[in-house]
Amino acid sequence: MKIFLTLIICIIYSITGRTQTMDSSRLDLLLSIPQEIELKISTPQPRIKEKMELSLNINYVRAQIFKTELGKFDLADDIGETDRDFMIMKVNALQKGKQFIGPLSFTMNGTKYSTNKVEYEVIDALPKVDKGVWIRKVLPNDSTVCIIVEQRIPAISRVTKIAENTTKYWTESETNNIITMTNTPSIKGLQYNTSSNFAEEGFFYNSKNEQKKFLSGYSINYFKIIDKKLKIKITKSDFLNLPTDYKFEDIIIQ
């Protein structure tokens, strides 16, 4: 219930974000669409306490809010202000196993809205290590495959005296080259859809209560399965920056 109330608050707030263009024909189309709002999750298989994003398509809500006023003005080029088409809320996964969100429903300006149901699976957290590579496939449905790449690169605290009374402290990772899939992946039987990659600093405390720092790399890649009869193979050549000591095993789909 807390998440649901926060979503409603964010929908109202997100009407005052950045600009996007929507012409009158698109607005008419939105007004004619049944009031089911698209709900999405950023990963189909988060880990325990992993941060993920819930996103809700707000175009339908925005169109319905202003539809009674359309006869009073002409549509401008920049019809509304929003942070993309989706309102996004960041959350952390807490319960292991198969989970679902929604369908959510609410009423605004006399119009009742509902969302689709999103299913996902929460798995164990990564071990307390500062070095490693974890690559896995997830099949959200029978037409989609998701390749998730996680990586930890050790970081070392460094100290340099740069003047009589000045000392510089910083943390430096062994490398900044995180693993990603190739820029234009061409895998027989699959059609590339979307991908996102990022890196951030992380740390944990070991059994001796020592802080271990690392650079955390994350890559998530979505593909559409276009040949369901084919034995699809994703190989080492489909990735960039794999460590030389990492033993890669081909990813087989179907």
Image (cartoon, rainbow, N blue to C red):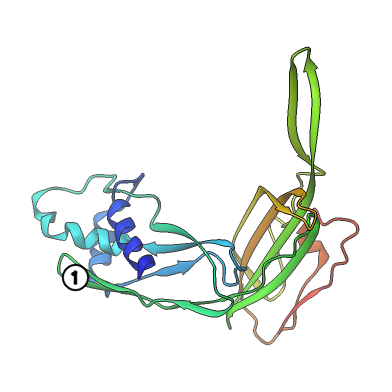
Q: Which residue is located at x 40 percent, y 58 percent?
A: 86
Amino acid of disc 1? Thr
- Give the x, y percent position of residue 251: 77, 74
Q: Is residue 97 above or below residue 31?
A: below
Residue projecting furthest to the top: 164
Q: Nearer the viewer, residue 207 or 129?
A: 207
Q: Is residue 10 above or below residue 111?
A: above
Give the image quarter of residue 228: bottom right
Residue bearing mark 1? 111
- Give the x, y percent position of residue 78: 29, 45
Q: Nearer the viewer, residue 161 or 14?
A: 161
Q: Which residue is located at x 77 percent, y 47 percent?
A: 177
Q: Is residue 125 above or below residue 197?
A: below
Mark 1 is surrounded, within 10 Å at the Cα level, by few (under 14), some (14 to 19) or many (20 or more) other residues, namely few
Residue projecting furthest to the front: 208
Residue projecting furthest to the left: 72
Q: Is residue 181 above or below residue 228?
A: above
Q: Nearer the viewer, residue 229 or 85?
A: 85
- Give the x, y percent position of residue 34: 27, 75
Residue projecting furthest to the right: 245
Asked if residue 226 lies left or right of residue 5, the reply is right
Q: State the SS at label 1.
A: strand
Give the image quarter of residue 192: bottom right
